[in-house]
Amino acid sequence: MRSARRALAFGLLLSTTACGKSGCAALLDDKPPAVDDTPEAVMKSNKLPPATKPVADFKPATNGFKFENYGNDDGITNLTIAEVRRMFGEQVCASLEGGRCTLTPAAQRWMETTNKGMSGGHCEGLAALSLLMERGQIDPKLFGAPTVYGLEIKDNEHLQREVAYWFATQAVMPMADAEDKKLTPNQVVDKIQKSLKGGDAYTLGIYGPGYSQGHATTPYGIVDKGKGIIWIMHYDNNYPGEEKAIEVNRKANTWAYKTASDPNAGENEYKGDATTFTLTLAPTSVRTGPLLCHFCGDVDASEETVAKGSKKGAAPDLRQITLDGDAELLITDEAGKRLGHVGDQIVNEIPGAFFAADRSGASDVDDEPSYFVPGGKKVAVSLSNGGKRSTESDVSLLGRGYELSVEGVKLDPGQKDEISFSGDFSLVTYTTKRPRTPMLSIGVETSTADYELEVKVRGHSAGQHVELGIDLKKGTFSVKVKGDAGDQPTLGIKLIRIDDSGEKTFAHKAAAPASDQTMVLDYARWKGDKAPLHVSVLSASGAVVSEEDEGDED
């Protein structure tokens, strides 16, 4: 689950992690806490002073960055544990042993997923941060220069992490639901024009059909060109120092613009009308207000505790479903209602659900939005490949105190696989007709410790159905593989527990239950590093076929 842990797993493909309530350890690196003169120390949260300058004074050649929008290039650092902790506080730490924050399983997953989402570009972070600096809410001197245009991104880790921080706010509540996707082009012009006179400021979202190829820029002016033509002047971070304009036809209520993720490459042509809602505005006031952690909390918390948290402004019970890769994703709830891509459009039929469109850089990759669905009900996720080449994707679901994920879903052209997530944190299943199974994982945060489990199935025929579950009351993880009679797949396993005493691990390379048998791991009875783990194998009827104390093979 965690990239650093995965590198230490010696190729083992099933892991469980537990984190003590003082916190899980930071897995990105072992850097010491920031000293007092660093931006991390100066900017301990996103609570910023009021704006002191008007947006109308913005000039790309002085207030924009002089470097181009960039992806996850060599030498770039995105979110670290410091930024996650800054955004949400110590609730994201499963352990604070020695003053070092170890992220909860869900927080670690959120950080990794968010960082991957910046591979197409950091435009949302660049658009938002340049606006905050121009308005006098963030001092560019913290990052190495008296002006925004004087800042360098190369070898400037503090600035890189700050850009990543503001990028990440686009998919965090309440910002995730604050982008206005119901505006006509004329209404966008009117709102920007009003903002130039004072009050709230906005970043501008630009999308293709179905909210594909999302890009974010900074609007700073309105120019009437006559005959009903309006130019929205904006800083496009794909074109440093240049003045760029989106053309709006007042009479037809349409808009058009060309941009490229790489100015040396071909441009994407964007256009829309009063029915497409693909020109959007995201309010700065929400981005700089309190941000709510929708994945924080104990899964075994009482209803009273949850209710108290809601009264104090905790995030609503929402689950975030994210895809990283080139597959097409469609979510279906128990009533058959859909959320996701149908053709080249996004449909949303699920009550209380919404999506946060990805604004990463106008790349040629049609990045999926982050989808948010209410908790408590089972959802099915279909992944399909309508292209002409094979693809690989990761899917994750984050809920209050837990994460479920399926990584390495390989789809051939025309292939469609199914993933099912239970209404809570207890079960994730994967069904494929191909002879290959990705990695499944569960991570939970409890009042005593945090746990993670990953499982990889190898050596089976096509047509497999894999179930990965957790039973908090029994203190067990379970793995079941349904397949052809006679199949005996092998399971790579790794168990990690993190509590106040530190981190403990267990790994097993070649567990081999028969098809339709269930492997049960008694994690609550496990004594720690180098101690055996009690493992049972159950028949399809639930009878014990075998049980033994397995040794650690890490």
Image (cartoon, helix red, strand yellow):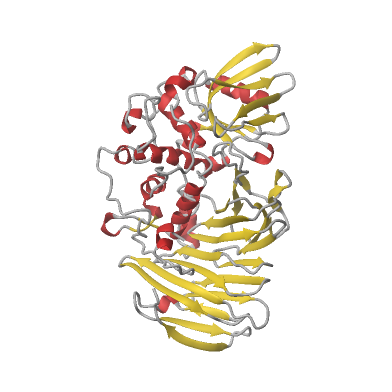
The residue located at (54%, 29%) in the rendering is 217
Q: Is residue 111 placed above or below 201 in the rendered structure?
A: below
Locate residue 49, reporting x and y percent. Answer: 38, 30
Q: Is residue 461 placed above or below 83 in the rendered structure?
A: below
The residue located at (52%, 88%) in the rendering is 546
The residue located at (43%, 71%) in the rendering is 495
Displayed quadrant of residue 422: bottom right
Counting every numbered tag in the picture gives 0
Locate residue 434, reporting x and y percent. Answer: 67, 67
Q: Quadrant of the C terminus?
A: bottom left
Q: Is residue 510 placed above or below 85 in the rendered structure?
A: below
- Front residue of 40/21: it is 40
Locate residue 407, reporting x and y percent. Answer: 55, 60
- Front residue of 67/113: it is 67
Q: Is residue 163 left or right of residue 42?
A: right
Q: Is residue 34 left or right of residue 381?
A: left
- Front residue of 58/285: it is 58
Does residue 173 appear anywhere in the picture?
Answer: no
- Front residue of 296/274: it is 274
Does residue 508 appear anywhere in the picture?
Answer: yes
The residue located at (32%, 28%) in the rendering is 141
Locate residue 374, reporting x and y percent. Answer: 60, 54
Q: Residue furthest front?
A: 264
Q: Is residue 188 left or right of residue 81?
A: right
Displayed quadrant of residue 151: top left
